[in-house]
Image (tube, rainbow, N blue to C red):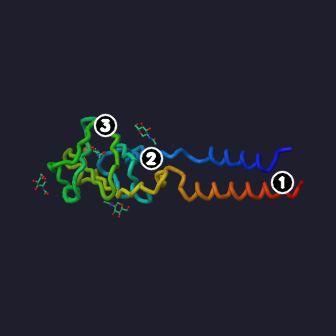
Amino acid sequence: MASPRMLLAVLVIVAAAAMPQSSMAANHTVGEASGWHPDFNYTAWTDGKMFMVGDNLVFNYKQGAHNVMQVGGADYKACNTSAATINTFTSGGDVVPLNATGKSWYICGFGDHCSRGQKLVVNVMSGSVSPAPPPSSSSISRNVVASYAYQIMVAAVALTTAMIFAR
Ligand SMILES: *[C@@H]1O[C@H](CO)[C@@H](O)[C@H](O)[C@H]1NC(C)=O
Ligand SMILES: *[C@@H]1O[C@H](CO)[C@@H](O)[C@H](O)[C@H]1NC(C)=O
Ligand SMILES: *[C@@H]1O[C@H](CO)[C@@H](O)[C@H](O)[C@H]1NC(C)=O
Ligand SMILES: *[C@@H]1O[C@H](CO)[C@@H](O)[C@H](O)[C@H]1NC(C)=O
Ligand SMILES: [Cu+2]
């Protein structure tokens, strides 16, 4: 018969294996399947999403038909396509890292696309809650993970107690 100590060890191992890997950076595909183009509400797309330092934005579009200019807030607001950019991306499948907290602004530099809605602002939150990065829109929340680990521990204690009294 398995000893309570052994059962506890097994449960601890199971709990450790159940914990997700610490790197949970998310890729946010801008506009999802619609991609990056005018006549789309990217503000609505950001609704309810969490953007964390370490996440990426992925801009999908036809190369040469659009681009991604990372600009300042004033140039975003003005749709200033001749703005001095922080970065410009042109590959059509741009993976743009969110590596700083605060707002990050993106516009398309082609024609009137920006004024037709091809513009995106995201508010990037800190990912500094150690040790693992905090939740992103597409990963399990820390609270869920924490409560799951807690429930396993409670179950382990209960089982161990039961084993002791059952002898
Ligand atoms: C995000 O996309 C990049 C580039 O395609 C890929 O290397 C990386 O594994 C992706 N990360 C996640 C969390 O899906
Ligand atoms: C885009 O959606 C937001 C809500 O997420 C709304 O407040 C805004 O008016 C919309 N913009 C346009 C141009 O429809
Ligand atoms: C657009 O950006 C350029 C370069 O930074 C600047 O000279 C110009 O004043 C900006 N225009 C507007 C409308 O903000
Ligand atoms: C932050 O991300 C931009 C791309 O948006 C990149 O050009 C820049 O080098 C990054 N900075 C750091 C410190 O990683
Ligand atoms: Cu465009």
The residue carrying pointer 1 sits among few (fewer than 14), some (14 to 19) or many (20 or more) residues within 10 Å by Cα, namely some
Residue at 26% x, 44% y: name it.
Answer: 68
Mark 3 and ligand 5: say if the CB distance to the nearest ligand atom is below 8 Å: no
Quarter holding the N terminus?
Answer: top right
Q: Secondary structure at mark 2?
A: loop
Quarter holding the C terminus?
Answer: bottom right
Q: Dot 1 corresponds to which residue?
A: 163
Percent position (x, y) of residue 20? 56, 46
Q: Dot 2 corresponds to which residue?
A: 25
91 vs 139, left or right, is: left
Q: Dot 3 corresponds to which residue?
A: 92
CA–CA distance between discs 2 and 1? Answer: 41 Å
Residue at 31% x, 56% y: name it.
Answer: 121
Three-letter code, disc 2 = Ala
Percent position (x, y) of residue 146? 59, 57
Q: Secondary structure at mark 1?
A: helix
Q: Nearer the viewer, residue 64 or 126?
A: 126
- Circles 3 and 1: CB atoms closer than 8 Å: no
CA–CA distance between discs 3 and 2? Answer: 21 Å
